[in-house]
Amino acid sequence: MNQTRRFHKENQKRTQRRKGAKNPQSFSLRDLCGFASLREIFCFIKSKAASVKWPIHLTATILIALLLTACGNSHFRKGNSALSRGEFQRALTQLSAAVRQDPNNYKHWRELGVALFQVRQFEKAIGALERARQLQPNDSRTLFFLGYSHELEGRFGEAIAIYSEYRRRTLFDPMAKQLQSRISKLSVQLAELEVRRALQEEKSMTLGQPKSNTVAVLYFRNVSERGEWNALLKGLTYMLTTDLGQVKSIRLVERTKLETLMKEIALSSSELYDRFTAPRAGKVLGAERVVVGGAIAMGTSAIQLDAGVIQTSTSMSMVKPVRVVGRLSEVMQLEKQLAFSLIDHLGVPLSETERESIQKLPTESTLAFVAFCRGLEYADSLNIPQAQAAFSEALRLDPSFKAAEQELSTLSTAVLPEQQFVALAASDPTASTNAQHLEAISSATQNSNASASPLIPPVQTGTIVVRGKIK
């Protein structure tokens, strides 16, 4: 009993010294983590019960809950502080303790994942960040480090999906541009891996069956062999792929993957039909069905587009070929007719939202669309300065041309090295103190040279001019 009283008096003195409080009943939550033994905790609870005149079991319940909270927050504070100082091993120790104390706090899991990322334990980081994501799906910091961990682990598909989710949530323009550029780079790398693997599996007779409802749109064949049409037909393939991609029940093979296949086997689009049959191409691309088409000149100002769908497993045409004819100046409207006819022949129902999305023209200017098509052709051949000039011209002709704006932004935004990329994610765009820092990093994303990305060679000046009317 004397020992309990003595401890009670000592605790009162310690609390008064630390807080300068006149009330002997005051204490700090941080003090709760400073006991050396269970005996001290018991004596403290007993003294508190006596001072506030509560039942001892009620006092014990409240104080133990406070004790767990205080210790968990204490570990988190220490771990976060160590993380900001670059003391990653110390941060791991403290944040692991914080997670054990409070396993339902998403911030504890998130910062543990960040610490694991910093020590290059990406697999463990992904586990911790996935747990944080389950607890708080809308946290941008979690999504950033989760996506980057997947990227550095070589899981490009997962990284692309998470970066895309981040882009849908963030209003931070420099980060949105950086992520779009990164998604573009990873899409190419993923396409290269998948195409090379598929070609190898084809050689070894182990190529698996494609997923159901997967469709690949092959480049339109230039039947008239008019060289100036090559870029235009690439743009039409881009449009048709985009339109079919609006249908939720259809899985679309990305144009990037088709372009990768063409480069991997070093064939032109016309040779694709002659030497690398459409069904075989579809199998390598992982498509159950392929859309094939061709374009024929009708005089000097008209065009005929034909398209059909082939089942890759049987090499048989699935639908009656679709044909549309019209003026060259109406080529985008002709593509829309083609898209709706193909969807109708496939028997795929469309929602009103899907129909409205497909109906929208990418631009009202045919000249802007022609410049955009040339930009795609230049970009695919890695002629980046000319591609930038072409997309810029498309935007000059139609400033509201979103597809041209996105392609230009992707080409003009170099992929940042890790240190700058992580710094960009750590910045708060709403904080005025970070304004200059953000501006500097944003400028870096626009002006970095080719060392940041193999897709972006040193920028040179270039001009592309589109003149006259298309009749």
Image (spheres, grey):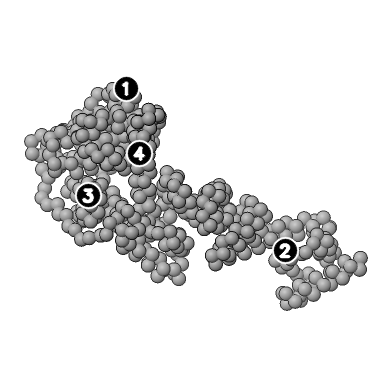
Q: Is residue 301 visible?
A: yes
Total labels: the figure holds 4
**Secondary element type, mark 1:** loop
Q: Residues within 10 Å of mark 4 (few under 14, many from 20)?
A: some
Q: Nearer the viewer, mark 3 or mark 2?
A: 3
| Amino acid at circle 1 | Thr
Task: Tell me the residue at 36%/34% (across/down).
Answer: 200
| On-image quarter of the N terminus | bottom right
Cα distance between the residues tagged 3 and 1: 35 Å
Closer to the N terminus: mark 4 or mark 1? 4
Between residues 102 and 186, which one lies in front from this camera angle? 186
Question: Residue 395, how many percent across, how many down?
Answer: 23, 54
Q: Is residue 336 visible?
A: no
Closer to the N terminus: mark 3 or mark 2? 2
Which residue in the rendered view is the most extreme toward the left? 299
Residue named by callout 3 = 378
Residue named by callout 1 = 314
Between residues 281 and 181, which one lies in front from this camera angle? 281
| Amino acid at circle 4 | Arg
Cα distance between the residues tagged 2 and 4: 58 Å
Q: Is residue 443 left or right of residue 419?
A: left
Residue named by callout 2 = 33
| On-image quarter of the C terminus | top left
**Secondary element type, mark 4:** helix
Residue named by callout 4 = 196
Question: Residue 55, how many percent across, how many down?
Answer: 84, 58
